């Protein structure tokens, strides 16, 4: 939010929708510069918010909340978190994983004592990395089974989803249909799915991108289930994660017209949500409601999807700390 044409005038804000309430509340962790962006990772009782580096901030402070953002406890990643939505992940057993520009880090408990699991260079040089032609790592997820890492591949038709195998990372063996053999593939999101993993893939062929969801409840011992593609010729604006390993995508096409679609989980199809209001920054998809969150400088407006129409539900004037980044 803020003055989005100026890095020092852009401020990231965190909002929560409290249980039992239909109103959003601004809950940005205080006292840390957030011009570089925020990433979030759900826990069994709350969420961890990570701050990306910006200006003179060369590391990533963490803020942990178990009460919806009313209070936060501090943490730290010594290397700056990567500029992707899923740069931080926590498993129910307390294990954490973080992705920086150069390393994959893990911590066994309390978001402290981070250790290098593997370097980005080592993943690129591995057999699975070479087969993908890793351009960059794009997502990380950890569960009791280990760590999963996503990538953007330069080799056509290859899905760069890697899973930990001891000290190595190997291909998770996601196979696309033969029709996508010439497409470039990027792993956009990775989330837990039962005891396994689900991923949102961007499959680009020419000027068209197909967004596919992939699910596997037992990677390494079971085949992946792929959704039908949600096809778009527009630019990807943002993605969303829904309950049950579902996903949402927001794209912008000709004349800046926005389009949104969501998929509820394995066995479901993409649902078209209708053109969201102008200025929509992202969509929020939950079990019983879908929201379009609109940003205009310091104004946050929530539109709820009601009977197929986007209806204005709430407006918040957010105090923006202009000048605090100088």
Image (spheres, rainbow, N blue to C red):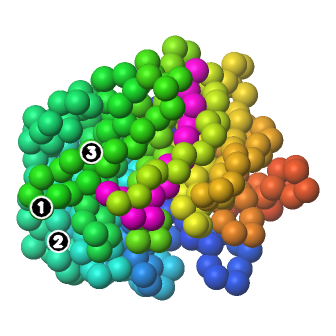
Q: Which residue is pictured at 60% across the width and 58% down the height?
A: 266
Q: Which residue bears the numbered disc 2?
A: 107
Report which quarter residue 123 is drawn in: top left
What residue would you read off at disc 3?
Answer: 171
Label 2: how many Cα within 10 Å (few below 14, some 14–19, many 20+):
some
Mark in the foreground, 2 or 1? 1
Image quadrant in which you'd find residue 126: top left
Which one is in front in this view, the residue at disc 3 or the one at disc 2? 3
Q: Is residue 211 above or below residue 162?
A: above
Q: Nearer the viewer, residue 234 or 24?
A: 234
265 or 26, which is in the foreground? Answer: 265
Judge whether 15 appears above or below 281 on screen. below
Identify the magenta region. 208-220
Residue 33 is at least partly visible in this image: no
Q: Main secondary structure of the magenta part?
A: strand
Q: Return the x and y of residue 14 as percentages of the image width and height.
A: 49, 63
**Nearest to N terminus: mark 3 or mark 2:** 2
- Residue hosting label 1: 166
From the viewer's side, name the closer residue of 35 and 319: 35
Is residue 198 on the magenta stretch? no
Q: Residue at x 51, y 32 (%)?
A: 177
Q: Residue furthest right?
A: 307
């Amino acid at each position: 939010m803020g003055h989005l044409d100026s890095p020092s005038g852009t401020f990231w804000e965190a909002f929560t929708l409290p249980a039992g309430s239909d109103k959003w509340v601004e809950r940005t962790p205080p006292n840390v510069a957030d011009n570089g962006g925020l990433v979030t990772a759900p826990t069994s009782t709350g969420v961890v918010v990570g701050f990306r580096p910006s200006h003179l901030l060369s590391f990533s402070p963490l803020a942990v909340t178990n009460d919806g953002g009313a209070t936060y406890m501090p943490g730290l990643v010594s290397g700056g978190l990567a500029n992707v939505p899923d740069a931080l992940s926590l498993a129910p057993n307390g294990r954490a994983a973080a992705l920086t520009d150069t390393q994959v880090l893990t911590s066994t408990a309390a978001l402290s004592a981070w250790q290098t699991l593997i370097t980005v260079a080592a993943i690129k040089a591995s057999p699975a990395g070479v087969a993908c032609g890793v351009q960059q790592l794009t997502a990380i997820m950890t569960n009791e089974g280990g760590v999963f890492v996503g990538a953007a591949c330069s080799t056509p038709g290859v899905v760069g989803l890697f899973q930990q195998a001891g000290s190595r990372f190997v291909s998770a063996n996601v196979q696309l249909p033969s029709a996508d053999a010439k497409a470039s593939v990027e792993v956009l999101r990775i989330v837990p799915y039962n005891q396994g993993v689900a991923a949102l893939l961007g499959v680009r062929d020419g000027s068209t991108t197909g967004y596919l969801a992939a699910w596997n409840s037992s990677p390494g011992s079971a085949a992946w289930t792929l959704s039908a593609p949600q096809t778009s010729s527009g630019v990807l604006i943002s993605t969303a994660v829904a309950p049950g390993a579902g996903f949402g995508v927001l794209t912008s096409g000709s004349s800046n017209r926005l389009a949104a679609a969501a998929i509820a989980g394995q066995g479901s199809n993409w649902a078209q949500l209708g053109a969201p209001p102008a200025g929509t920054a992202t969509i929020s998809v939950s079990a019983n409601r879908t929201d379009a969150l609109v940003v205009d400088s310091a104004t946050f407006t929530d539109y709820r999807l009601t009977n197929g129409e986007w209806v204005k539900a709430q407006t918040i004037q957010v105090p923006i700390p202009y000048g605090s980044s100088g």
